[in-house]
Image (tube, rainbow, N blue to C red):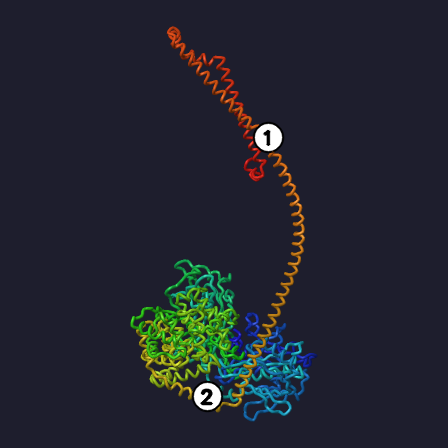
Amino acid sequence: MEECSSVRSTDSAGTSEEYEIVESEPVTASTPQQDHPLEPTLNIANNGNMEDLRLELTEVMREKSSDGSSPPTTNGTSAARRGDDEEEEEDDLPVFPSPPPLETQASRVSQISQVSQASSQSEGPGRPDDRTLGENNPSFSHQTASDDDMERVHAEDGSGDYTIFNRVTYLGAASINAPRSEGEIQRNMAILNAQAQEQALEVSVSVPSNSEGYVIVYDANNSTEMTRFKIHRILFCARGKADTSEACCFAFTSSHGDTQETAIFQCHVFRCQIPEAVARVLITFAAAFRRVPKSKMGQREEACPSRQPDDLIHLFDISLEIKEEDNKGNFNTVPRDKEFFKLRSNIEKQLVLTVSPAPPSSLPSMAHHPPAPADLCVERCFGLLVAHGRRVKHADMNLLEMVSMGSSVSDKKSYVISGHWDPCDPVFAVLNQETPKDRRVFMTVAIDLVIRGIQEPVRFTIETKVRVYPQNERFWYFSKKPLVHLFSLKLKQVDHSPQGDKQYVVTAVDNLGEVERWRPSTMSLSLNLSSLTSSTLSSLSAGRSPSIASIETPGCEEDTDDDEPLLSGSGEVSKDCPQGELDLWRQVLPRMQADSHHQLPKGVASLVKRGVPEALRGEVWQLLAGCSQNQDMMETYRVLITKDCASDQVILRDINRTFPAHDYFKEAGGVGQDALYKISKAYAVYDEEVGYCQGLSFLAAALLLHMPEEQTFCVLKRIMFEYGLRELFRDGFEVLHMRFFQLGKLIEEHIPELWQHFQEQGVEVHMFASQWFLTLYTAKFPLFMVFHYLDLFLLIGLDSVFQVALALLQMSKKELLSSDFEGILKYFRVSLPKKYRNEDVARQLFKLATSIKVKKIKKYEKEYLALKEQEALQEDPVLRLERENRRFLEDKMRLERENDDLAQELVNSKITMRKCMDQLEDKCDSLGKEVVNLNTVLSDAEEEKKRLLMEANQVKELLKREVEKGDVETQSKSAIIADYKNICSQLSERLDKEQAANARTINMYKAKVASCEKCSALLSPVCGPTVEMGLEESPAVTRLQQQVRELELELAKTKLALVESECKNQVSSPDNWYALPFII
């Protein structure tokens, strides 16, 4: 941002009403002498404080009433408007710094105005000269600077008077990136003042009395001129801070270079031997800035009509666009319906308003009114305000943070203002809540513009409807057409200002409602030499050739999908190939692989021109580039991706915009984007002079779709160095300008009627061919055409760019001849890439391209070099020396930057090493303490181990004794068990015998009873039960049964004793010791 503001900082441009000098102490006519020097202080009106603005307007009106037609003598820092309109468009007015505000500034301004009035009356009605500023002003009557230190001379060339300041020391100059940054100037002032003993020169400084002169520095010894500065080239003046060693110093910044691309800025520092003279020097500078030569004033007065009408009407078109941030850090225009804008909640937004003159035909009644003043233009935007609702009071409006303001690049008459809108702020709650269906919310947007010739800011208000959708809402078909309102500004001319400018007062501001305008806001191609680098000025001042940092994908401002530009990476490429074509490639590929001299076999050129089969492109491209077996470069690539790169943030931001239509690169953080990031980073580290170029990211992406990362890097490096593509980015794009010249000559030779049409419409080659050269047609065209062109480029080289460019123009000749300027640019941006989505049309294009002869390229190169030599011979020696000096300064700055980088790296390394050493020492101490603790724990553990070993031995001995005792008991019990078993067996045998004897006895008795007829007859009815009962009740039987039960009981007890003995035996055994818990 700082570099951009260095080029064109409209928000810091000075105007005659913007600020005035205020003395550090009140001054009155009765106190001409003071005990201490007075320092000029600035009261800037556009500081955003409404109270300051009110005071400022009051002071201006007081000045007008007190001074009449005479200029205020103490308003030294008011920047004068220059008489040359061209200079006003090229350069910004100088700006003076604003020290901390002092109390009662309004009263001081009033006193100063009274003093000025008194002095002007004493001098007469004429304009006071510089001597009046220094001598008749009581503010400076106390100073000790003598008249010998400031002398007044008159230039014989009619350029006006000059004031020469003697006894001044020139401390030197330094390059500066932000010429309007007071902090940067103070820093350079301190550095150069500290080095004053080494490089200081005694000089005299000559300051002109008007804005048409030069600030000239003379050698104090021999009065020879050392250097001079055009007054309109001085951008900023500042003096050293009080109570410091720089209090007697002053400095100003100046621009060198004719264009924004080549401009550099320098800070020149001087020191006055008398500190009080610094204020007088600044007053003299301010007088020079604000005064117009009398000859210019006379011309203006002659040009003014003797009678002015009462009312002048000026028409403005003010368009409103609302942009929302996407997830890639960019801002895209929100869709707009016929009546309302479609917003998403909780998303950062930007408001972009464009103010441009409206055609007089916009208002039929304009025919009866005098035309608006032609020199009415916007100087700056005082504030951008937003509120919900309509007919909003001033107090309810909310001020937005200003992002940028300034004239449009494509249309100098248009003024563009953009502001940042955070919808999450509570004051915007209504505009951040989802709107119910079929309902809308009103929103009011206002801008306060400071317009040249009008003392007070003019407010323009636009009311529109919006509808708020959820944050994740997606809109598929919509219009991005801006909202345009027509405003009528009625003015009344008052007397001329002291500087000779017309002055107006506003009588009415009317919003005439919405109008339909075809506004080509971004019809021109977004790629131009002023936007090729991320920081062109810083690159130039640092002494390195700039590289592309951003090749934007231009947005679309039209209604239909036909007006949407084709996304890069669009289109499908078929891998189908006729068998005959594959057979031809099968024959030549082995010969290409076997040829170590990179000589293409016969027939390869014709095959490549017809297009390499998609399946073979990766291998063929490496063979054509001559890097198929470059193992060293592959190893270099693996090393490069591990190094740090200063362009990491730029690369990470830009890879999201490379081939967004291709699935491989679509996913954020995916494999494709990761590989593309590593390749871009590796090349940026490898080629430090060119660095990272987003234009090359498209080329790298096309290569990456056909080969691995390592091979892609090798081919990319080969294209850049061997094919000469990197030369386009070096030396301020000097070679690229030569290519534009060559292409223009070829167009004039091959398509003269189209060249004539371009000349009539003001279309220049760089407007459409920049991207073709820098990206090799890979950024906008369909993939089929991109891959086919790379076939041709790797075969032919950069000449193919000219051939394809001529073929594109010839095939689009009819459409281009029937289009105007905006239509031509739109055709190149939108229609031309879409035309080649058809493969047949693309093949026809390359067939035509290969038939075009561009043999005169060398001739045109010589013509270009001859023109450059002629220009160099005709060039002013001063300009040539300035350019050489600038080149030396660039080299110096580059070397200083490298030295600073190395020093910083060394300091960082030392700091890092010191931190590592401290961490290691701390870790060593902690580890030492830990070792001591562990040794203590180890000794305790060893003692515990010894104790446990002793206990274990004791337990073993006890166990051994118990085992032996158990064995003895087991043996004795085993003998008892054996005896019990014998007893049991004997009792069992005896029982069996008794039972058998009893059974035989019973059977014998039964037999004897049965043999006796009488006994059997008597006993037969009751023999069975009686016998049984008798047996059961027999004492012998009962006794035997009792004996059996006792034996069984004794047997059970014996078995139980046996089991217990076995259990005790198992417990006593060592083998069963650890099974004890389970047994229990």
Residue 576 left/right relative to 680: left
Question: What is the x, y in percent for residue 793?
Answer: 38, 77
Q: Which residue is the extreme one toward the right?
A: 35
Q: Give the camera-side residue of 952 and 636.
A: 952
Question: What is the x, y in percent for residue 566?
Answer: 37, 71
Question: What is the x, y in percent for residue 657?
Answer: 43, 69
Q: Give the camera-side residue of 330 and 361.
A: 330
Q: Is residue 413 visible?
A: no
Q: Quadrant of residue 560?
A: bottom left
Q: Is residue 706 above or below residue 143?
A: above
Q: In this figure, which residue is indicated by the disc labeled 2?
A: 868
Q: Is residue 566 above or below residue 367?
A: above
Q: Give amino acid for label 1.
A: Ser
Q: In this figure, which residue is indicated by the disc labeled 1?
A: 972
Number of residue marks = 2
Is label 1 or label 2 in front?
Answer: 1
Task: Measure the C-alpha gap from mark 1 to mark 2.
Answer: 129 Å
